[in-house]
Image (cartoon, grey):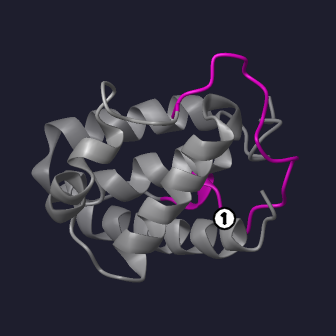
């Protein structure tokens, strides 16, 4: 089955497979922040418009500004605190924020044969997602 949002087959099962790798092997977990952010950007029905823009901004900070996840967590502590946040991140209506887009790369472009290859592929995928996402008018 082809995903109506990213265009890949079985993307969700692949995503969960990769999360399991990242939670059980430290070598794979290095890119967890990129895996999740790239995936949710390509599946905008999981997010509100503000949530999608927030995630796109995070990916920009990770990849362009080279901010590490720990720094971002500290920097955004109050911004994303559910008691203080002024916007919703997750969507409850399941409607996509963006119209179907042609993504340069999807999670299917990521190989998991070893941690080095996996991390390189996730980084390449995340960069392609950011480039594609920055071209979208949301």
Locate residue 99, reporting x and y percent.
Answer: 87, 47
Image position of 10 (left or right of 100): left
- Direction right: furthest residue: 99
Image spot of residue 38 (x, y percent) = 52, 55
- The magenta region covers 88-110
Residue under circle 1?
Answer: 105
**Which residue is at a point 83% across and 36% down the rendered structure image?**
4
**Residue at 64 percent of width and 76 percent of height:** 131
Say which residue appears at 80% left-offset and 28% top-offset. 1
Rendered position, 78 above or below 114: above
Q: Which residue is nearer to you in this view: 119 or 132? A: 132
- Dot 1: element: loop
Q: How many marks?
A: 1
Q: Position of residue 80 (x, y in %)?
A: 34, 40
Query: Magenta stretch mostly in which secondary structure?
Result: loop
* Picture quarter with the C terminus: bottom right
As displayed, is residue 123 above or below residue 17? below
Q: Nearer the viewer, residue 62 or 76?
A: 76
> Which of the pair 34/67 is nearer the observer?
67
Q: Position of residue 95 (x, y in %)?
A: 79, 27
**Residue 135's image quarter?**
bottom right
Horizontal relation, residue 37 to residue 95: left or right: left
**48 inside magenta stretch:** no
Q: Residue at x 46, y 58 (%)?
A: 111
Residue 72 lies left or right of residue 94; in this view the side is left
Within-10-Å neighbours for mark 1: few <14, some 14–19, many 20+: some
Residue 101 colored magenta? yes
């Amino acid at each position: 089955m082809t995903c109506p949002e990213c265009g890949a087959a079985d993307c969700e099962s692949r995503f969960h497979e990769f999360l399991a790798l990242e939670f059980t092997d430290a070598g794979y977990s290095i890119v967890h922040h990129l895996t999740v952010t790239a995936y949710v950007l390509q599946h905008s029905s999981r997010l509100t418009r503000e949530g999608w823009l927030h995630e796109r901004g995070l990916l920009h900070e990770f990849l362009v500004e080279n901010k590490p996840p720990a720094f971002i967590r500290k920097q955004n502590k109050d911004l994303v605190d559910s008691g203080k946040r002024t916007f919703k991140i997750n969507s409850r209506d399941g409607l996509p924020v963006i119209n179907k887009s042609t993504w340069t790369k999807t999670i299917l472009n990521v190989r998991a044969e070893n941690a080095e290859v996996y991390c390189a592929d996730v980084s390449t995928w995340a960069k392609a997602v950011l480039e594609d996402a920055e071209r979208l008018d949301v």
